[in-house]
Amino acid sequence: MTVDVRVTRHPFLDGKLKRMLIDGKWLEAASGKTFETFNPATGELLATVAEGDAEDIDRAVAAARRAFEGPWSRVKPFERQNLLLKLADLVDKHFDELADLDTLDMGAPMSRTRGSRLRAVGMLRYYAGQTTAIHGETIENSLPGDIHSFTLKEPVGVVGAIIPWNGPLTATIWKIGPAIATGCTVVLKPAEEAPLTPLRLAELCMEAGIPPGVVNVVPGYGETAGAALSAHRDVDKVAFTGSHVTGQKIIQASAGNLKRVSLELGGKSPDVVFADADLDAAVPGAAMAVFANSGQICSAGTRLFVERKIYEEFSQRVADFGKTLKVGDGRDPEVQVGPLVSVEQLERVTGYLSIGRQEGARPLSGGERLTEGALSKGFFVPPTVFADVKDDMRIAQEEIFGPVISAIPFDDIEEVIGRANRTGFGLGSGLWTRDVTKAHKLAKAIRAGSVWINCYQAMDPAVPFGGYKMSGYGRESGKQHVEEYLNVKSVWIKTG
């Protein structure tokens, strides 16, 4: 059953062209090109946006370089901290507006986007705290004579930041927060599917008093603006979140000036359920490890390994739980599963639904696009659970990025460790058990950047997040994230 969602027009959607921010000024694209962004739940036009390309990236990088080598280089840590705290206060003040813009532009239910206040504001305040905690160290060396040695931590320089569409607000903060904290400047290329929240956040950056050129936002397409940014010879570092295929292209593009690169890429994460687990907690936990955000989460626990003695029961319970979730327009506060972000993503996910059936997997729930009533206007796929999945099936090996679980039985702990690691990815992983010995053994054995035990997708600004293998390198959040934006300089002074 669907209901009409009656909402007032979002204040940011005023019918005017959404321009790019370069050097503190709102500019049209040098080419004059624009593109349109749509609500994936209804198909309605939200806004027309300036389409940046290589020339606009050149302008933005030049502005970032001027700021980095000019006034921004003289701003003290306390001042940068104060700017981040002002921005945090503004994000807190306007949070519902920002969250609702995420819902409109990429489809996530407001029950999810409005629930991320603590994370969004908390990240900014965490980076503010880190601003005054950056320091080198004095190192006693073993050379003869009076030679003193110490290190300095210095900002890496101009950062090119490229973000995905599956969480625009927090993804933007995850990139600009550490840049400001460390004294870097940044050129942000938001995803073309969801550019509106980053542009609104850029307005708040200006309101907070962040100087011109420190934060620049150039919307556009990956193959033009994104490619130009990742290859630009005056960019010192690229921070990218997205697919491993694009990540590989960014590494290749970075070779021109050997720029620093940090990558948070895709995943095919294992979520392991033992028979001794608290199944009442594990069922919704394993389900929402994938169904949250319509499965559009890089660390989603899409390979659900279930101990064989409870496999049929547990898989069916997860499928039944998925059937209870309300699918629809994210502006409805009762909706728990929104649309996929675009028609391209819809075609990708429904393609995998067909592949799963062709390979012999058995759908316990979902499995087809939803087209009834108002859902026909959007890109909706219901929570889907496939049983009888084999490790070598494509739905068990390839990232789908939709609300699709592959349920796979296992018999013992050694077996499941090997099978859980038999993937090119290594971003997230989960484990459900009451046995502390199993918990410790798998936490150490699973090759992934995060291991969640009796929970899934727990995140905190102080705790690092990142991947192994094809899921990328570098970390976001935590002190390790700040280090990604710093160079270490060794200084030697002979005094005698």
Image (cartoon, rainbow, N blue to C red):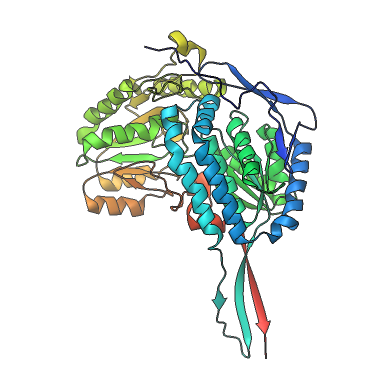
Image coords of residue 235 (percent x, y):
71, 50
Left or right? Give the position of 68 relative to 138. right
Residue nearer the viewer, 247 or 208: 208
Left or right? Give the position of 415 relative to 81. left
Image coords of residue 94 (percent x, y):
53, 36
Residue nearer the viewer, 75 or 241: 75
Image coords of residue 98 (percent x, y):
53, 33
Image coords of residue 402 (percent x, y):
45, 28
The number of numbered discs placed on residues in the rendered structure image is: 0
Task: Check the image and name the residue furthest to the top.
Answer: 373
Q: Measuring 64% from the left and 38% from the top, which residue is drawn there?
A: 203
Asked if residue 416 can be seen in this view, the reply is yes
Q: Quadrant of residue 293?
A: top left
Q: Measuring 49% from the left and 58% from the top, which residue is drawn there?
A: 479
**Looking at the figure, which quarter contains the C terminus?**
bottom right
Q: Quadrant of residue 115?
A: top left
Asked if residue 466 can be seen in this view, the reply is no
Q: Measuring 35% from the left and 29% from the top, which residue is drawn there?
A: 389
Task: Give the answer, above or below, for where 403 lies relative to 203.
Answer: above
Q: Measuring 29% from the left and 54% from the top, which residue is drawn there?
A: 440
Left or right? Give the position of 154 relative to 454. right
**Looking at the figure, which quarter contains the N terminus?**
top left
